Image (tube, helix red, strand yellow):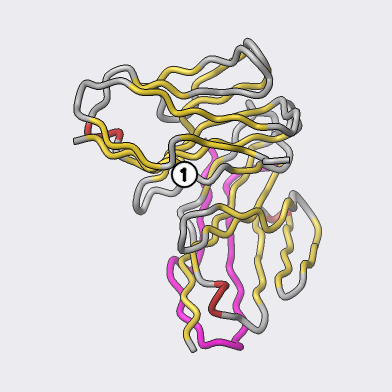
Amino acid sequence: NAGVTQTPKFQVLKTGQSMTLQCAQDMNHEYMSWYRQDPGMGLRLIHYSVGAGITDQGEVPNGYNVSRSTTEDFPLRLLSAAPSQTSVYFCASSYSRVSTGELFFGEGSRLTVL
Amino acid sequence: GIQVEQSPPDLILQEGANSTLRCNFSDSVNNLQWFHQNPWGQLINLFYIPSGTKQNGRLSATTVATERYSLLYISSSQTTDSGVYFCAVRKSGTASKLTFGTGTRLQVTL
């Protein structure tokens, strides 16, 4: 039982490049989400999903796309990276789609956009 | 949206000391969690505590939902307790998301 797995752990991009951060969970959780963490700002929700085929925007969705084709996977896509997207990204999942339940985090992906 | 305030923002303790961290929130909640982010950046679940009191070893937490606050107690602190402690809440009746406070940064010295 690996929990929540994120890849890659580190990535450097040039402005305008695209990339996908991968997130997978093996706990059969309905709810999955992406957060970004910036110094002094805590964690802010980017996008979330309450089940396969269902996604919604969080607080800071601009510049990011998501999809949820399976229960296990929830990739985050940056279509045209900008320096403002330099951050640490966390994927998280929980069992309950209704009340979020106890949220479990992956180990994070540190992204630098030059 | 719901506001989450944590205090103090920074705390320095000597090993063996006790501390209390506070989380205030601006609306009714049906989900509250405490996390510890260690110096390596990992977010570790401490408590899922929308109400009541829980204890886990040297750590305990109390949430008084009617008064909109939660407390995290750390007793006999150790250097491994260093890091940032986050409180996160979900407003009752809203879409499934947790809103995080900005954290309390704890440093435990020898």
At label 1, which amino acid type do we have?
Leu
Count the numbered circles shown: 1
Locate residue A67 relative to residue A20 in the image: left or right: right
Q: At 60% from the left edge and 78% from the top edge, which residue is drawn?
A: B19
Is B14 covered by the magenta stretch?
yes
Residue A9 at x, y percent in the picture: 43, 41
Q: Name the dominant secondary structure of the magenta segment.
A: strand
Q: Quadrant of the C terminus of chain A?
A: top left
Residue B63 at x, y percent in the picture: 72, 58
Mark yes or no: residue B30 visible.
no
Q: At 56% from the left edge and 23% from the top edge, which residue is drawn?
A: A74
Bin the neighbour count of mark 1 within 10 Å (Cα to Cα): few under 14, some 14-19, many 20 and up: many
Q: At 61% from the left edge and 81% from the top edge, which residue is drawn?
A: B77
Residue A57 at x, y percent in the picture: 49, 21
Q: Given the image, what chain letter belongs to the residue carrying mark 1?
A: A
Q: Quadrant of the N terminus of chain A?
A: top right
Locate residue B68 relative to residue B40 in the image: left or right: right
Q: At 59% from the left edge and 43% from the top edge, which residue is drawn?
A: A105
Locate residue B57 relative to residue A37 in the image: left or right: right
Residue B15 at x, y percent in the picture: 56, 87
Is B21 covered by the magenta stretch?
yes
Q: Nearer the viewer, residue B100 or B84?
A: B84
Q: Is residue A107 above or below residue B52?
A: above
Q: Which residues are magenta?
A: B1-30
Q: Nearer the viewer, residue B34 or A28?
A: A28
Q: Quadrant of residue B56?
A: bottom right
Residue receiving disc 1: A43
Mark yes or no: residue B61 visible.
yes
Q: Is residue A1 above or below residue B103?
A: above
**Secondary-structure class at tag 1:** strand
